[in-house]
Amino acid sequence: MPKILKILIFLLVLLITLIFALPTSGFIYKSGDVEEANIWGQGYLISERHIVSAPVLAKITAYTAREEETDSSPTTTASGQQVREDIVACPRKYPFGTKFKIEDKVYECQDRMAQKNDEKFDIYFNNLNEALSFGVKKLPVEVVK
């Protein structure tokens, strides 16, 4: 077999391997020492207890513990915890306990929104006026674990 053909086959196998090895979820989970990775131009900080994803632009709303906004048990989240200021309702693809950084504050996913709003985030506020003042925003969201 000619040498050029061997090189082309090698490069093709390498290309196929790289394509299947690329991350599809946008998140890297790895334990160990802190290290940095740069995948497709998105920077990641990785450590055993602190994982930050590249920011994703998402629609963010606000809610309070009123039955009009929630259900018949407005102070209990979908995960069974009591509502508190650092809770966010997040899309179902994220497990309860996932932490998100939104506007330099960390929120914990302990609630869900209606299925039709499953791609949005909904931050809990104790005060209705604060929730109304927050309104609806499109903001970068980072997963922090």
Image (cartoon, rainbow, N blue to C red):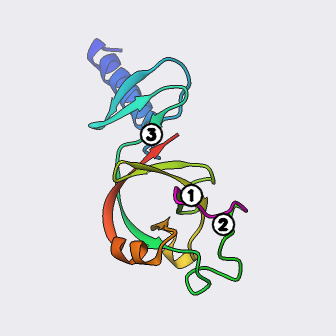
Residue at 67% over, 66% down: 78
Q: Judge whether 135 appears above or below 106 on screen.
A: below
Residue closer to the observer: 107 or 112: 107
Q: Which of marks 3 and 1 is in front?
A: 1
Q: Disc 2 and disc 1: Cα gap in Å?
A: 17 Å
| Disc 2, SS | loop
- Other residues around mark 3 within 10 Å, as few (<14) / some (14–19) / many (≥20): few
Question: Could you tell which of marks 2 and 1 lies nearer the N-terminus?
Answer: 2
Residue at 67% over, 63% down: 82
Most prominent secondary structure in the magenta stretch? loop
Pointer 2: what residue?
77
Image coordinates for residue 43, horizontal then vertical, percent: 32, 34
Image-based side of 120 in relation to 140, left or right? right
Question: Could you tell which of marks 2 and 3 lies nearer the N-terminus?
Answer: 3
Q: Judge whether 126 appears above or below 24 on screen.
A: below
Under mark 3, the amino acid is Pro
Q: Give the range drawn in magenta.
A: 80-86
Pointer 1: what residue?
93
Image coordinates for residue 27, horizontal then vertical, percent: 46, 41
Whether the residues at callouts 2 and 3 have beta carbons within 8 Å, the answer is no
| Disc 1, SS | loop
- Other residues around mark 1 within 10 Å, as few (<14) / some (14–19) / many (≥20): few
- Other residues around mark 2 within 10 Å, as few (<14) / some (14–19) / many (≥20): many
Pointer 3: what residue?
23
Residue at 42% over, 44% down: 26
Residue closer to the observer: 48 or 41: 48
Residue closer to the observer: 32 or 38: 32
Image coordinates for residue 84, horizontal then vertical, percent: 58, 60
Image coordinates for residue 94, horizontal then vertical, percent: 56, 54
Q: Which of marks 2 and 3 is in front?
A: 2
